Image: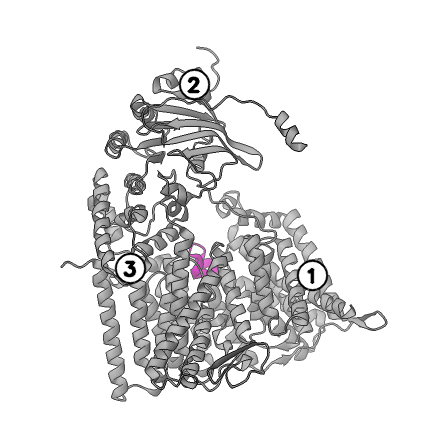
Amino acid sequence: MSEVKRRSATKMVPAPSQGIIPERDLYSAPVLETRHLGIEFGGLKAVEDFNLIIGKTEIAGLIGPNGAGKTTVFNLLTKVYQPTMGTVLLNGRDTAGMNTVQASKLGIARTFQNIRLFGNMTVEDNVRIGLHNQVRYGMFTGIFRLPGYWKQEKAQHERALELLSIFDMQDMAGYRAGSLPYGAQRRLEIVRALATNPSLLLLDEPAAGMNPHETEELMNNIIKIRDRFQIAIMLIEHDMNLVMGICEGICVLNYGRIIAKGTAEDIQNNPVVIEAYLGKKKEG
Amino acid sequence: MVAFLRFLINGVSLGSVYAIIALGYTMVYGIAKMLNFAHGDVIMVGAYIAFCAMAYLSLPPVVAVLMAMVVCTALGVVIEGLAYRPLRQAASLAVLITAIGVSYFLQNGALLIWGANPKIFDSVFSVGSVRLFGGELTITSETLLTIAANIVIMIALTLFTGRTKLGKAMRAVSEDKGAAELMGINVNRTISLTFAIGSALAAVAGVLLCSAYPTLMPTTGSMPGIKAFTAAVFGGIGSIPGAMIGGILLGMIEILGKAYISTELGDALVFAVLIVVLLFKPAGLLGKPVREKV
Amino acid sequence: MKLKKSTVNALISYGIVIVAFIVCQSMISAKAMPRTLKGQMIPICVYIVMAVSLNLVVGISGELSLGHAGFMSIGAFSGAIASTYLLNALGLESEVARLIISIVAGGVTAGVFGVLIGIPVLRLRGDYLAIVTLAFGEIIRNVVNCLYFSVDGMRLNVSFNNPNVAGTIILNGPAGTKGIKAISTFPMGFALILFTLFVVLNLINSRSGRAIMAARDNRIAAEAMGINVTKYKMMAFVTSAVLAGMAGALYGLNFSTFTAAKFKFDTSILVLVFVVLGGIGNIWGSIIAAALLTVLPELLRAFADYRMLIYAIVLILVMLATNNPMLRSVFERLPRALRRKAPGAEAKGGAAQ
């Protein structure tokens, strides 16, 4: 009886808008697709009806005023929070019920807004943590130093230095991560995330606290990373030069809802976006 | 049935003592975020002071209890000032070890002053006992007074933290020390006050405990201290009603477990229940789970 | 072949331990060691292993454990039972073989309990985790007090809360073990220290060890990097339990009789004090602190009744001094070789700016 009732009460909603992806990615499966994604914290809808599609090698931007729910979206995608509504498809696979570790193994990696390095470990060891799941030797091999240990440690060391060289950080490999200057810590977080061999890299305010020169360098490096590793990158950023400069598809979030999607040009001319950022226009 | 009632009442009575000790733990934890392992030994000191006042100075029980409270209050404030205050910025493990040092100090100090031989504690109460069911069930005056004291303390503390300015300052400091300081609250004085209240309660608990279980030794406080700490965690550490509920439940579990399951395993049962509760409510019965912001 | 820095450091560590052993052993042979100190050699070994293994949980894995003596207790009793069974039922006369098998048995049993206890404990965080380890330590002590073991021919009899077991009693409930041959030796203690160092140092410098430390430094980031935090916390916890169990077996077999009361909460705290005073996460610090603080009460014997009071005061003063900002800056200026923690990090990091 209740079954019938529920069916008759079904409300019809439009299918998720497919959004836009770069033309070159048209013939590959999208790396990420979300459908009606949302989360409620005790009745408060922090994010709702979040629909997005990201192409295989796209650089996407997620922008919006403070408190719009941008980091919450990252937390939903990486399964730090379990969504209360909707689906996340990562490389075509539904991530429902997965935890952060499983999401990472499925190819999603991230950096954090408030840097979360392993401060007491060396720079190289931080990258090696990122390589954790690419190395396959167990506890006993490690303790009793079986041949596999030496071989894989050496390979891991070389790989770590190679990744650090993206940001010219190979000379800092022996330093304690917590002692690095702020900008270097942000770059190390990106290297560490890359080390997990992701297909989608999420960067949470990568340029925060950087000077214009460093930001410029970062922009080049983000493009370099995309080209070299052929991965998709999604970033949250307040620096509009960076976002408009390198992001192909941009998504604007306000009060947990997407208010605009499109290219840099679309977004810059969108009155709703301007209103969200600057408030209602009183006069020209 | 009568036997069960008797065990139940004894359980509530022992639980009330645990609750009073647990209040000290929970308030100190709430405000200073430290596990004060020396708290159990303050109980012991309180009991010794009351014992000396009655046995050597022949003071009336009420005066003896007051004296114990005054000495313990002073002791608590001095311990906090000398040993814990300099460590306010230190790692929590450093504070924990210092608290353990203080605990050793109090135990061994008591050993030197009062010796290792147990003292037989005379009950501080001389009121008669209540007989029910034609004399089958006797409730001693100690039991009644313990439960009464527990209720009074609970109400007083709730009013104090909820209604008074100092109580509100305490809550503010436990919430956020930095912000409280910016609002003009003297954080150090507030923490001292918390230790003072906790230690005064410990003195009361010591007297009540030794009235019910009259052997007094330098190690008397340590096991009740650990159990009261368990009670505080059980109820949700930092929460005053939590400490109360945790203490009473723990006392009941201990007495009933010893009576009906195994005398040897009474303590194990208490700890087992704690573990089970924490598995289902990781922050205790009334504790609020904290979510880390990502 | 060029050796890694961590390997060199480990080799130096083994070297120092071996030299210390040779010095002590020749002093014993030359009868140059005071009697009181000689009797302390095995306990020193035991507490060094206890401290290093606890440091694996507290320092490397970053979880406060207040029940480490529980694993020591499990190891001690299962070691004593194994040793007596081997002698009485299987007629194994060789003391060395019996000791080794008993130590392994102690470690394995403690490890099994480490897994069983770790499953609920490691679901909790911070102080709640600490209190639950304390609870388990107390439960173990209470339960051992109710256990009766006896050997009857080839059979090993167990009973719970019932002293009537057939055959020769090995474990007699609250009265403790009975008729155990004290077979622990100082060389075996030394070997156990070397083994512990080997396991812990190699673990730290491996994939698993790095994962353990990453989970300690930042749980959320470690998970985002695909590290199964619970698995690695468990690995540290169980390894630590195994080592503590082995130390317990060595400790138990140093006496002909001992009771569960030896492994009270106080013993857990004692070992924790070694770890904290030696420097959390600093393996060498644990070794030195355990050795010195095991001997210290013996050296303070002249002060008789005051020694524990002095111990308490020293403990408080050391904690206050090491956490005093002014004294701390003096420590920072000590030669780096003395500190060993995070070698050279600050100086180089500063230069990079």
Residue A274's label in the rendered image is 2
- Distance (Cα) linking label 1 and label 2: 62 Å
Residue A19: percent from the left, percent from the top?
40, 22
Q: Is residue A24 left or right of residue B100?
A: left
Check disc 1 and report the residue beneath it. Answer: B150
Q: Residue furthest bottom?
A: C31
The span picked out in magenta is B84-95
Q: Which chain letter goes with mark 2?
A: A
**Which of the 4 image quadrants contains residue A115?**
top left
Q: Same chain for labels 3 and 1? Say yes or no.
A: no
Closer-to-camera residue (B93/C193): C193
Residue C110 seen by the camera: yes
Mark 1 secondary-structure assignment: helix
- Distance (Cα) linking label 2 and label 3: 58 Å
Q: Is residue B88 magenta?
A: yes
Closer-to-camera residue (B155/A246): A246
Q: Same chain for labels 2 and 3? Say yes or no.
A: yes
**Which of the 4 image quadrants contains residue C338?**
bottom left
Q: Residue furthest left?
A: C1
Which is more foreground, mark 1 or mark 2?
A: 2
Residue A100: percent from the left, percent from the top?
42, 43
Q: Main secondary structure of the magenta part?
A: helix
Mark 1: give few (<14), some (14-19) or many (20+) Cα within 10 Å. many
Residue A4's label in the rendered image is none
For the point 45% across and 36% down, the residue is: A76
Which is more foreground, mark 2 or mark 3?
A: 3
Check disc 3 and report the residue beneath it. Answer: A141
For the point 50% across and 70% down, the residue is: C265
In the picture shown, does residue B131 fall above or below C155?
A: above
Q: Residue furthest right?
A: B134
Mark 3 secondary-structure assignment: helix
- Distance (Cα) linking label 3 and label 1: 58 Å
